[in-house]
Amino acid sequence: METLEFIIYPDGRVEETVTGIVGRSCAEVTAAIEAKLGRVIDQKPSSEFYSQPNQDVLTQSATGQTTGAVSTQLTQW
């Protein structure tokens, strides 16, 4: 499950934590929110950021037909 957690401090700082999104796509998910919140002063990527998304393997049979599909994770705002 994809989650975004925001902690807003009394001095106006906002801490954002993203979980459940594998790879660099988390930056795409949070870009619009970060643009509205203001300047990003620090980023600490989690281990999920450095992971590769799961992808199904495409296989080719002896007849030349390609089977399989590539998995894609999409988030809509």
Image (spheres, rainbow, N blue to C red):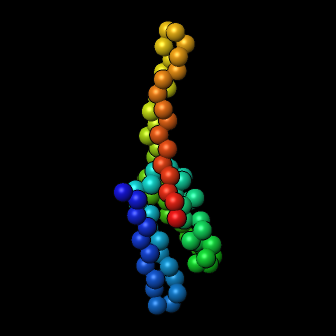
Number of numbered markers: 0
Of all residues, the one furthest to the left in this rendering is 1
Q: Quadrant of the N terminus?
A: bottom left
Whether residue 44 is visible: yes
Image vertical order of residue 74 relative to residue 7, above or below:
above
65 in relation to 29, above or below? above
Expressed as whole percent of the image width and height from the top left, the position of residue 43 reads 54, 66
28 or 44: nearer the viewer: 28
Question: Residue 33's x, y, as percent?
Answer: 56, 71
Residue under the point 40% across and 56% down: 20
Give the side of residue 77 with respect to residue 19, left or right. right
Identity of the residue drawn at 50% across and 57% down: 75
Quarter where residue 36 is shown: bottom right
The residue closer to the viewer here, 50 or 38, is: 38
Q: Considering depth in this image, is 59 or 37 the residue closer to the camera?
A: 59
Point 53% across, 16% down: residue: 65
Q: Residue furthest top?
A: 62
Residue at image coords 48%, 32%: 69
Q: Position of residue 8 (x, y in %)?
A: 46, 83
x, y percent for residue 77? 52, 65
Q: Does residue 50 appear in the picture of this structure?
A: no
Residue at the extreme bottom: 10
